[in-house]
Image (cartoon, grey):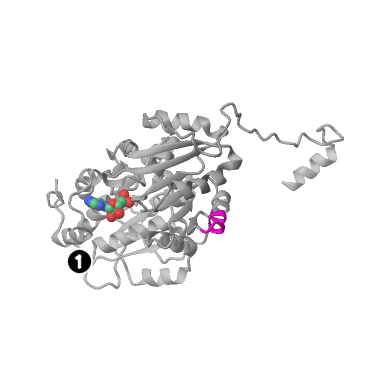
Amino acid sequence: MSFKDLQLNRPILRAIAQKGYDNPTLVQEKAIPLVLDKKDVIVSAQTGTGKTAAFALPILQLLFDRQEGPKKGKKIKALVVSPTRELAIQIAENFTSYATHTNLTSTVIFGGASIEPQIEKLKNGVDILIATPGRLLDLHKQDQINLDYIETLVLDEADLMLDMGFIDDVKKIERLCPSTKQTLLFSATIPYKVEQLASSILNQPKRIEVAQNSSTSKNVNQLLYFVPKKDKIELCLHLLRNTIKGHIIIFRRTKYGVDKLEKTLLKNGYKADSIHGDKSQTARQEALNKFKKKEVNILVATDVAARGIDIDNLDAVVNFDLPNVPETYVHRIGRTARAGQSGMAYSLCSADEKSYVLDIQKLIHLQLDVMDDHPYPLDPKAKPIVHKSKKTGSKHKKGRKSEASKKKKKRWY
Ligand code: AMP
C-alpha cells in the first residue's frame, strides 16, 4: 500500500515525501482510514512503529479542507495529550513538518518551562495543540485555552499517562472537550486500567493492534552477564572498554542510579549524559540533543524518561538494571536493530534479578546468551541479598508503645 492509496492530499503527500517515507507503516495503514472516517480508535502500538504519523497525518487531512487563512483567531480543533514534555515536543515537531505545505498551525505547551511564551503562542491562535496534562489544565483554568471547538482528542501513551498518575487529569480534560468529538487512544500496552479508561470515554471504538515487536528481539544479539550487584559498575566499565562500542543507551531503574552511573562514566573519561524525571526540562532536552547530535555517545536513562522518545538506531542497549516488567525489556532493546538491522543488548543480572530473566525469556521465547567469560562472575549459588529492617521497635520496651506516644503519633499525622 502507498500513501496515495490512503487518500491523503497533495500538500501532505509532499511533506511525507520530503521526510523520506516511502510507504506507510502497518499502524498507519490501519489507523489512517479509520481516523479519516471519524471513528474512535484504540491503538496498541509502541514508539518506533510510526504511530505519531498514524494520528498526525489524518488529523491534518481532516482539518486541511477547512483551513483558515489568517493565523489570528483560529480555534483549537485537535488536541493531543502526552504524558511527558519530551514526547510532547517530539509530536509537535512531527505536526510542524507534516503541515509544512498547509496553513495549519500547531503549538506545544508543557510544564517545567516559563508559561508566558506559551500564552503568547496560544493568543496567536492555533489549529492543533499538543500538551502535557498539568499545564493544559493550568492554562485552561487561566482562560487561555478554549476546548469548546475540539473535534479530535488524542491520548498518546495512555498506559504511561496512567502510570504517572494522570488519570483524573485525563478524565477532566476529556470532559472539557465537546461530547461530539472523536477520541483516539494510543498505548504501548493495554492493561486493565487503560481498558477501563477507554470504555468510559470512547464511543464504540475500533481496535488496532500492532503486535509487540518481539520479532525485533530476534534481530538483537542479546547477551546476559551474571554479576554480583556490587560489581555491576566495574563490569559495565570493563564492557565499555573492551566490548561495547558506538551509540549506546544504558538503562537504570532509579534516578539515583542514573546520576551515580553518569558521574562514574564522566570520571572515567566517557562522553555521557543522562535523562530522568528530576532533571529540569532544559537539562533533559540538552542531553537528548547532545546524544542525537552524537556529541556524547552514552545516554544513561530511566525507563519513564526514555519512553516514547524517538532515539533509535542505537548500536547497543545496556540493561544495567533488569526491568521487573518483561515488556519493558522488549521496549528497551527495540531501540537497537531498527529497520531489519541487527543490534546488541547487554544485560547485567545480579542474584536478586534472576527471576526477571525467566519472565523476559518466557515473553520473547528466546534464551539469552549467558556470557561467563568476564572478571566479575556471580557465584551460581549466590542468594539474593535481603535487606532486613533493623527497626523492630524500641530497644527498651520491646515494641510496646505508651499511650502518650500513641497520642503523639496521632498528632503527628
Ligand atoms: P513514532 O513511532 O511515531 O515515534 O515514529 C518512529 C520513527 O519512524 C520516526 O522517526 C518517524 O519519523 C519514522 N516514520 C514514521 N512513519 C514512517 C514511514 N511511513 N516510513 C519511514 N519512517 C517513518
Q: Residue at x 21, y 45 (%)?
A: 34
What's drawn in magenta, residue-wise? 262-269
Q: Is residue 321 visible?
A: yes
Amino acid type of disc 1? His
Could you tell me residue 136's position as x and y percent?
Answer: 43, 59
Name the one closer to the observer, 345 or 178: 345
Q: Examine the image and state in which quarter residue 41 appears.
A: top left
Say which quadrant the N terminus sits in: top left
Could you tell me residue 5's position as x and y percent?
Answer: 12, 49
Q: Is residue 201 visible?
A: no
Residue 370 appears left or right of 177 = right
Name the one closer to the observer, 149 or 236: 236
Residue extending farthest right: 396
Residue extending farthest top: 381
Could you tell me residue 181's position as x and y percent?
Answer: 29, 51
Q: Residue at x 23, y 55 (%)?
A: 57
Could you tell me residue 22's position as x and y percent?
Answer: 17, 52
Secondary structure of the magenta portion, mostly? helix
Q: Is residue 281 above or below residue 300?
A: below
**268 magenta-colored:** yes
Q: Which residue is mark 1?
A: 101
**194 magenta-colored:** no
